[in-house]
Image (tube, rainbow, N blue to C red):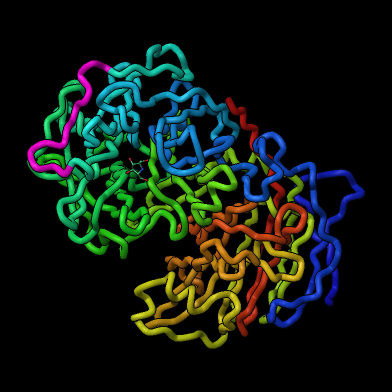
Amino acid sequence: MGTVRPIIKISPMASSAVCFIGFCSVLLGFVVGIQASHVVYRDLQSIESSPKDHLPYRTGFHFQPAKNWMNDPNGPMVYKHVYHLFYQYNPYGADWGNIVWAHATSTDLVNWIHHKHAIYPSAPFDINGTWSGSATFLKGKKPAILYTGIDPQRRQVQNLAFPKSVSDPYLIEWTKPPQNPLMEPINGINSSSFRDPTTGWQGPDGRWRVIIGNKRGRRGMALLYRSKDFVHWTKAKHPLHSAKDTGMWECPDFYPVSVEGENGVDTSVIGKSVKHVLKNSLDDTKHDYYTIGTYYTEKDRYIPDAGSIDGDAGLRYDYGKFYASKTFFDDVKNQRILWGWINESLSREDYIKQGWSGVQAIPRKIWLDKFRKQLVQWPVVEIEKLRVNGIRLPRTELTGGSVHEISGVTASQADVEVTFELSKMGKIEEIDSNSLMNPQHLCSQKGAAVKGSVGPFGLLVLASKSLEERTAVFFRVFKSQNKYVVLMCSDQSRSSLREEPDKATYGAFLNVDPHREKLSLRSLIDHSIVESFGGKGKACITSRVYPKLAIDGGAHLYVFNNGTSSVTISSFSAWSMKGAQIKYL
Ligand code: DQQ
């Protein structure tokens, strides 16, 4: 075992508490000696947020209901300074079914109050289910919700709901106007592939538009509807956009992003100051992909930019578990915020047994990267309120084959930010252009235990003391045709001694030049979730893991380098995270 060095604490605390980094420079067979200075702040584990906190996989600061099944985020909005999140929910069990719109509100996107269900089957036009949809502000900032109802013939139809009282900032009661359903699957539209209306936007002619997810054969499409009054809708001749061989487009989202800076813009903004984003959730692969392009208002058509590809080979918000996402414009803070559903990686039998299923990702601010070719995402700044007992490492060289334990944070519930500098890159592994096709495949072939030259280096999170269990979130640098290629991976292959959870390894390419820029990584660790942001939010990977040993006080955190080249940790900060305050019904 190596030396033990003091590290700097970020927030002042009682003088008796000192944090250490254990310096265990042992070859990475992942069997290392571990020093005993790990501090567990039991009192910082979530008490408030989890009525079943004896269950090891319940989260401390992610959004989830007290029990049962949750899937898509629906109709997010901010109204009278109150944030609203509705979500697809099964009141009767931990499996998908009996779907209603459950409802919660918050003033800071971190602490939540759950309310009674807002929209639930009550009339023929939604008697068999109230499925996903979106919120729009009409004239005078009156909220309106469009959602998919399942009718007595099991057809998917689009319905409207209004708040009973616009003076209630919590929007507890909702009514459904008698004109429902507003849009029906007629004239050849497949009645089982017609769902998930978006937030509406107004064109230059003042008429409202929304798109509805659909497919014709294997061609995924976004059907366009227009309306003068938000009640009477006419289908446009052409879809807003479609793409062959992509299958059903669920939960489409269409919005403008500013070409300059990080501020969000309202959904009806058009013109030279913005580009447009179309996101679709691919039913076939359960991936949320997006394109960046131009919205041609004269033709009411959206065309992705050259190189912005439709389908699974395109850009994704998140290269791990993240589906049926939805954005909204937060006019309080001038930002666009993204919500996404993180499903379980357990078998159906196991999540039914645990009595709950599904978590929402930490809401992310989302904006266009300065090169205008991709989006950037970052956890909303409010989440930093939960940080306590921060620690910081001095600049440290991570020699090839070393693992260092980071002590002083509650490793099962933490926020970690690290920056790596690659000043002395030695020989770099070459890869052929075929390997550039599929980052997930490359990460599975070259997991954390596979030695490289520059990398793998990164974090081992939710790791057991002797590293039998660990989730590795790391980078690896390659060269291909004289260009650097940075791969970011979240390797779950050793995340649990349990056999049954899905332990797929996820991967993404990171558009960062490691010669000029440092490589940054932030991971939000929350018992069974690891949400990671590479390159300051240019690539995101969310993993679900179910360790047996690395739970609560048994969880540890490490930095590692399993390459032959040294890398320098130029900055390292970590915090224990308090639990969010959640009030259940
Ligand atoms: N979930 C909803 C549908 C949507 C799907 C049903 C996506 O409206 O297409 O719960 O996860």
Using the image as rendered, state which of residue 131 and residue 75 is in the foreground: 131
Verify whether residue 82 appears in magenta.
no
**In the image: residue 342, left or right of residue 178:** right
- The picture quadrant where one finds residue 481 is bottom left
- Against 148, is 294 above or below? below
**In the image: residue 469, left or right of residue 81:** right
- Against 202, is 390 above or below? below
Q: How many marks?
A: 0
Please say whether residue 39 is visible from this viewpoint.
yes
The N terminus lies in quadrant: bottom right
Ligand 1: image quarter: top left
Residue at left offset 43%, top offset 43% = 96
Using the image as rendered, state which of residue 480 and residue 424 is in the foreground: 480
Verify whether residue 186 appears in magenta.
yes
Using the image as rendered, state which of residue 449 and residue 369 is in the foreground: 449
**In the image: residue 152, left or right of residue 92:** left
The location of residue 364, given as percent across then percent down, is 48, 45
The location of residue 368, given as percent across then percent down, is 37, 50
Residue at left offset 37%, top offset 56% = 287
The location of residue 462, given as percent across then percent down, is 67, 60
The location of residue 318, given as percent across then percent down, is 44, 56
- The picture quadrant where one finds residue 163 is top left
Residue at left offset 84%, top offset 66% = 5
Q: Residue furthest bottom?
A: 427
- Against 368, is 541 above or below? below
Q: What kind of secondary structure does the magenta stretch mostly adopt?
A: loop
**In the image: residue 56, left or right of residue 465:** left
- Magenta region, residue range: 177-190
The C terminus lies in quadrant: top right
Please say whether residue 339 is visible from this viewpoint.
no
